[in-house]
Amino acid sequence: MADPLRIVVLLSGGGTTLQNILDRIHNKTLAARVVHVIANKSDAYGLVRATQTGIPTSVVTRKSVPSSESFSERIFDICREARAELVCLAGFMQFLPIPADFEHRVMNIHPSLLPAFGGKGMYGHHVHEAVLKFGAKVSGCTVHFADNEYDHGPIIVQRAVPVLPDDTPDRLAARVFVQECEAYPEAIRAFAEKRIRIEDRRVHIE
């Protein structure tokens, strides 16, 4: 039996996506191990979740380094030291340049069907508010490989939800999050099982 996939999780807030990953690992539906959690905010509750589970944590703030490149370098040095095979962005609210040795090894989840409602400033409730304001009939979530543009890298998994006439941003967010909880483990599982093949921008899952 193969060793569990070594994951480093990056987050900025409550850590609900981290918790979802940990729950899937615990119930043995995801053959992975979270070996480190990195936050860019010292008060991120996700750090508490990690510590309670015995996972090492680090805090790297953007203000503590002179540039985006040095911010990225410090974070990925921790990932290398932890021997991360995959880095999962889980509500990480800071632009992060991806070094060459981590190309197609950093995943992100976004609460819309990319390329719609993505880009700089489009995160969390801003996305759901924009979906409702635009009058979209369908929304959802997207798991993709992160690259050096916001919400741009190759798409791995997407799941759709209807936008209902009486939706509020909170109601839509809750329905999308249910699908996020399925989509992210699905993408991680495919990566762990080496079933992902990439041609140009197109991701094939064998």
Image: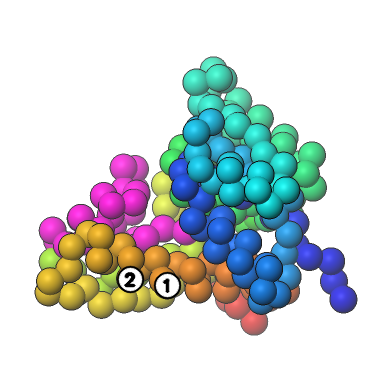
Give the percent coordinates (x, y) of residue 46.
Answer: 54, 46
Is residue 136 highlighted in magenta? no
The quarter of the displayed image where residue 33 is located: bottom right
In the image, the segment drawn in magenta is: 106-134
Give yes or no for contact between labels 1 and 2 (Cβ–Cβ under 8 Å): yes
Identify the residue at image location x=73%, y=48%.
54
Q: How many marks?
A: 2
Q: Residues within 10 Å of mark 1 (few under 14, many from 20)?
A: some
Instruction: Please give the label number shown on residue 179.
Output: 1
* Residue 160 point in image, percent of width and height: 35, 76
Q: Is residue 66 visible?
A: yes
- Amino acid of disc 2: Arg
**Is residue 93 shown left or right of residue 123?**
right
**Residue drawn at (85%, 71%) of the image:** 2
What x and y, as percent, mark residue 121?
A: 31, 42
Task: Tell me the amino acid under the disc marked 1.
Answer: Gln
Mark identifier at residue 175: 2
Q: Please tell me in which quadrant of the rendered image residue 177 appears.
A: bottom left
